[in-house]
């Protein structure tokens, strides 16, 4: 987005009205932005494997109307219980998911996976506290939630109000390397990844379907956001490739994809980001210019590119300038 | 506008939050021009006393993104094209918890034509640059910046990790030409804790720890002395120009917790 497009003239924003200009600036398109009611109705769950249901998140930013339902979330029904993976972006989003589970199975919710610290993935957890499940997370998730949880919560409350936001929920089972749980007829294997998308990314593999759940280690169509380590993410992509899965449920994008081409696209963006930022640093292109020039050849490939690419360059620049 | 934390959603949220600016955010985002002006007058008085500050479009100019991509790292360029007239420049971020972000006093080895630094911005705010000319007069320029949460945004790592290598420095020199000022980029490893960031383990606020004094000299001549505060982004990077005299560039930095570090860098020989 260009700075000049919104420069002067705007003073107060009253209440929660979203002017078209601001909406456009924030990367939102008013014409396709659902109201809350319509959003809830239009959400469906796709069965991506036997007993595996996934809701496609909106390709948008969090707004008061969409209750931050922007991540792919879902659940697996096992013989002995239900595992929820990705809880949703708010208490309201989590409550929607919990109601959908109840429509499909009477089995208890025994496990809830918190794939990383970002609010669009963890704020639905509050809806499942009453089920007393095991909350599974990366060993570094607790400290990341400690540092950022309240900060995120405050912002979400400003957007959605206290009632729809929910509490910060901490993991009760932490994974430092790998771990597995058994639902009776399927085994779920977890891998704690090194700094990549964030510093606490947890992936999951289902033995029943062979599906891989890389969460936000895999973005499809929506531009990835970098909040961990660029070099680390490229390394973890290699690790995901070696896991032997052919299909995966990305954290954002379609509910299920062929893994290899999706990882190739992701790798293409991250490599362009890395190489472009390195070149900018080597040529003494300052950060404020680099944000507008790096990885521009990727622009047509990703939704929300203008909203996030400059930000990604800023993060990459800080990481790479000390190389 | 945003936190140090990028995320799909952290950024998403912040973008959306700032875009919507609900009532709770009102403080900085919805202030009227009058309120902003009143605040600036109050701040200016606390820093400069009763001295008159004239507006200028020529002695100093601020370049900052109208909307920050990352509120914890907002790149600022101060342009001061009038050679030999500028004694010092102050950067004030009106709505930050500690508005007085930095003051640079230039020495005989300085070429203050362009100065770059990275700051944190906590709210929608006016930013002011005030220059003091050699004859002791003050001039101000202003720029409005939209950002939020830059001071309280937690770093993406533990405090220990953030403090790793504290005081390490690097200097990059642009090409040098005989008789011309040399552009240099100084990088310093330092978390510059703002005092508003939550510690990940104790879940208490990490005490403010920031570089409060930084002196760069070329031989015996000072390039600049910077007085800094919590508004400077972590791992400070400052881009400046100096008049080389063949001697190494010396950097002395200290922080408010008693840390001090010195490094010396040799500029490349001029090429024709």
Image (cartoon, coloured by chain):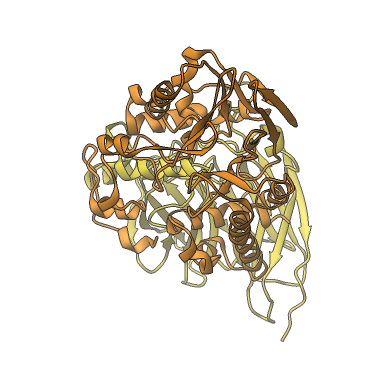
Chain colours: A orange, B yellow
**Residue at 39% across / 30% down in the picture?**
A93
Q: Which residue is at a point 69% across and 82% down the rendered structure image?
A: B178
Does the rendering let one see residue A19?
A: yes
Could you tell whether A7 is left or right of A144 in the image?
left
Q: How many marks?
A: 0
Question: Does residue B241 sit above or below B253 in this rendering?
Answer: below
Between residue B181 and residue A208, name the one nearer to us.
A208
Q: Residue B118: x, y in percent? A: 54, 52
Q: Is residue A105 left or right of residue B34?
A: right
Picture layout, residue B268 above or below residue B198: below
Farthest residue toward the bottom?
Answer: B272
Which residue lies at the image location 59% right of the left edge and 36% below the top edge? B193
Residue A229 percent coordinates (x, y): 66, 47
Q: Is residue B41 visible?
A: no
| Image quadrant occupied by the N terminus of chain A | bottom left
- Location of residue A185 in the rendering, given as x and y in whole percent from the top left corner: 64, 24
Left of A246 or right of it: where is A93?
left
- Give how far across and how far down residue B30 sits, in percent: 26, 41
Residue A115 or A286: which is nearer the viewer?
A115
The quarter of the displayed image where residue B258 is located: top right
Q: Quadrant of the C terminus of chain A?
A: bottom right
């Amino acid at each position: 987005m260009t700075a000049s497009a919104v420069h002067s003239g705007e003073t107060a924003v009253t209440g929660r009205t979203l002017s078209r200009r601001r909406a456009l600036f924030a990367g939102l398109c008013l014409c396709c932005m659902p109201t809350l009611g319509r959003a809830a109705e239009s959400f469906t769950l796709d069965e991506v494997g036997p007993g595996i249901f996934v809701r496609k998140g909106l390709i948008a930013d969090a707004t008061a109307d969409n209750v931050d339902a922007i991540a792919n979330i879902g659940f697996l029904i096992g013989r002995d219980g239900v595992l929820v993976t990705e809880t949703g972006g708010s208490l309201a989003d989590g409550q929607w998911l919990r109601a959908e589970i109840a429509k499909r199975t009477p089995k208890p919710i025994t496990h809830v996976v918190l794939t990383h610290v970002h609010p669009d993935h963890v704020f639905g957890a509050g809806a499942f506290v009453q089920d007393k499940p095991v909350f599974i997370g990366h060993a570094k998730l607790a400290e990341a939630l400690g540092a950022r949880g309240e900060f995120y919560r405050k912002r979400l409350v400003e957007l959605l109000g206290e009632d729809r936001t929910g509490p910060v929920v901490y993991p009760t089972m932490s994974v430092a390397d790998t771990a597995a749980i058994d639902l009776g007829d399927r085994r779920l294997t977890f891998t704690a990844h090194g700094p990549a998308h964030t510093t606490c990314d947890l992936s999951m593999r289902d033995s029943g379907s062979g599906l891989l759940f890389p969460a936000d280690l895999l973005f499809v169509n929506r531009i990835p956001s970098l909040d961990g380590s660029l070099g680390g993410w490229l390394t973890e992509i290699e690790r995901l490739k070696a896991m032997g899965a052919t299909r995966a449920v990305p954290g954002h994008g379609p509910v299920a994809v062929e893994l290899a081409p999706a990882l190739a696209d992701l790798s293409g963006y991250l490599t362009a980001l890395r190489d472009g930022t390195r070149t900018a640093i080597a040529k003494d292109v300052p950060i404020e210019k680099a944000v507008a020039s790096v990885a521009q050849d990727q622009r047509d490939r990703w939704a929300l590119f203008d909203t996030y690419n400059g930000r990604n360059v800023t993060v990459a620049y800080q990481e790479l300038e000390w190389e | 506008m945003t936190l140090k934390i990028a995320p799909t959603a952290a950024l998403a949220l912040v973008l959306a939050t700032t875009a919507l600016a609900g009532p709770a955010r009102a403080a900085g985002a919805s202030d009227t021009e009058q309120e902003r002006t009143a605040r600036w007058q109050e701040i200016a008085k606390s820093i400069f006393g009763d001295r008159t500050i004239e507006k200028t479009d020529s002695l100093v100019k601020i370049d900052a993104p109208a909307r920050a991509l990352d509120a914890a790292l907002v790149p600022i360029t101060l342009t001061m094209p009038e050679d030999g007239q500028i004694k010092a420049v102050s950067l004030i971020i009106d709505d930050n918890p500690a508005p007085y972000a930095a003051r640079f006093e230039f020495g005989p080895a300085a070429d203050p034509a362009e100065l770059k630094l990275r700051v944190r911005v906590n709210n929608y705010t006016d930013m002011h640059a005030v220059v003091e000319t050699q004859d002791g007069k003050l001039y101000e320029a202003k720029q409005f910046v939209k950002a939020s949460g830059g001071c309280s945004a937690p770093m993406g790592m533990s405090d220990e990790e953030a403090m790793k290598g504290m005081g390490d420095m690097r200097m990059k020199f642009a090409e040098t030409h005989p008789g011309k000022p040399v552009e240099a980029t100084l990088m310093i490893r330092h978390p510059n804790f703002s005092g508003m960031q939550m510690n990940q383990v104790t879940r208490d606020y990490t005490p403010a720890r920031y570089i409060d004094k930084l002196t760069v000299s070329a031989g015996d001549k000072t390039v600049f002395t910077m007085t800094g505060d919590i508004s400077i982004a972590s791992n400070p990077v400052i881009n400046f120009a100096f008049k080389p005299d063949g001697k190494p560039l010396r950097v002395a930095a200290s922080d408010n917790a008693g840390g001090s570090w010195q490094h010396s860098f040799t500029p490349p020989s001029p090429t024709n």
